[in-house]
């Protein structure tokens, strides 16, 4: 549905019917062009339309987030789900890189490498190598003293042209440039087969945003996710 100032796209209620552990009954993005794009389930379309009419121009105000939780809470509860109040006021910076020429390749350290089946290497991060292998997601990691201490990996693929990445560094090894190194290496590899690499970070993590910009990412917009969990 395309209306002046915003668009709404709906997904089937399949995740609700199948009792997925996590649901996203509403999420939206606002690009640098000011265009609002809303995504919702078929059963929350009416609420999404009401949200758009009321908050399209102020959809990152705290009052908007409070309205979303108040209006969506009854239907979420009726499904047998609950929201996470800790995430009510948290939105995301959306950053992208599309050209290898924009990546600062000088950040790549010699201890960063694209790994495949590192079963014999100790893992000091919370990333699950088995899951990454199962989903065929690519990742770059820093191996120091025989262990993976920092990693950047694909989170998901939005389509054949866009992939999102995330990163983590063990606290003991932060401040060494490992995250920047792995993000730069992984992004370079991903751009061989993708048009866009996306990096998202919360509004409360300024260091993460600056890290992405240091590597070569540029902010393209903001987004918000209303998430709920099976009780």
Image: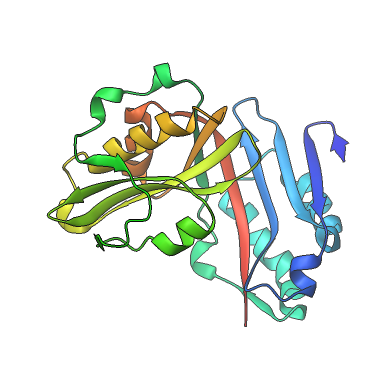
The vertical placement of 5 against 58, above or below, is: above
Residue positioned most to the top = 101
Q: Is residue 231 left or right of residue 201?
A: right
Q: Position of residue 118 (x, y in %)?
A: 32, 56
Q: Residue at x 78, y 32 (%)?
A: 5
Visible residue check, residue 174? yes
Visible residue check, residue 202? no
Q: Residue at x 25, y 60 (%)?
A: 121
Q: Position of residue 128 (x, y in %)?
A: 40, 63
Q: Residue at x 72, y 78 (%)?
A: 77
Viewer-nearest residue: 112 or 218: 112
Q: Position of residue 229 (x, y in %)?
A: 61, 73
Give the image quarter of residue 75.
bottom right
The quadrant of the picture occupied by the N terminus is: top right
The vertical placement of 81 against 191, above or below, is: below
Q: Position of residue 170 (x, y in %)?
A: 23, 57
Q: Is residue 1 left or right of residue 186?
A: right
Viewer-nearest residue: 53 or 200: 200
Residue positioned most to the left = 145
């Amino acid at each position: 549905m395309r209306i002046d100032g915003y668009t709404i796209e709906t997904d089937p209620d399949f995740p609700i019917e199948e009792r997925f552990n996590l649901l996203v009954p509403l999420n939206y993005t606002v690009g640098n062009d000011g265009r609002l794009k809303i995504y919702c389930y078929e059963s929350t379309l009416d609420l999404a339309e009401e949200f758009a009419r009321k908050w399209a121009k102020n959809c990152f105000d705290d009052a908007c987030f409070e309205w979303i939780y108040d209006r969506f809470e009854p239907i979420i509860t009726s499904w047998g789900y609950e929201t996470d109040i800790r995430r009510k006021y948290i939105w995301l910076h959306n950053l992208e890189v599309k050209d290898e020429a924009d990546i600062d390749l000088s950040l790549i350290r010699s201890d960063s490498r694209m790994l495949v089946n590192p079963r014999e290497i100790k893992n000091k991060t919370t990333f699950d190598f088995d899951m990454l292998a199962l989903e065929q997601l690519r990742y770059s990691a820093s191996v120091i003293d025989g262990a993976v201490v920092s990693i950047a990996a694909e989170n998901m693929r939005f389509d054949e042209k866009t992939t999102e990445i995330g990163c983590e560094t063990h606290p003991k090894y932060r401040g060494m440039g490992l995250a920047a190194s792995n993000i730069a290496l992984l992004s370079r590899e991903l751009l061989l087969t993708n048009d866009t690499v996306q990096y998202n970070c919360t509004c409360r993590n300024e260091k993460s945003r600056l890290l992405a910009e240091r590597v070569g990412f540029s902010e393209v917009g903001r987004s918000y996710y209303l998430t709920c969990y099976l009780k």
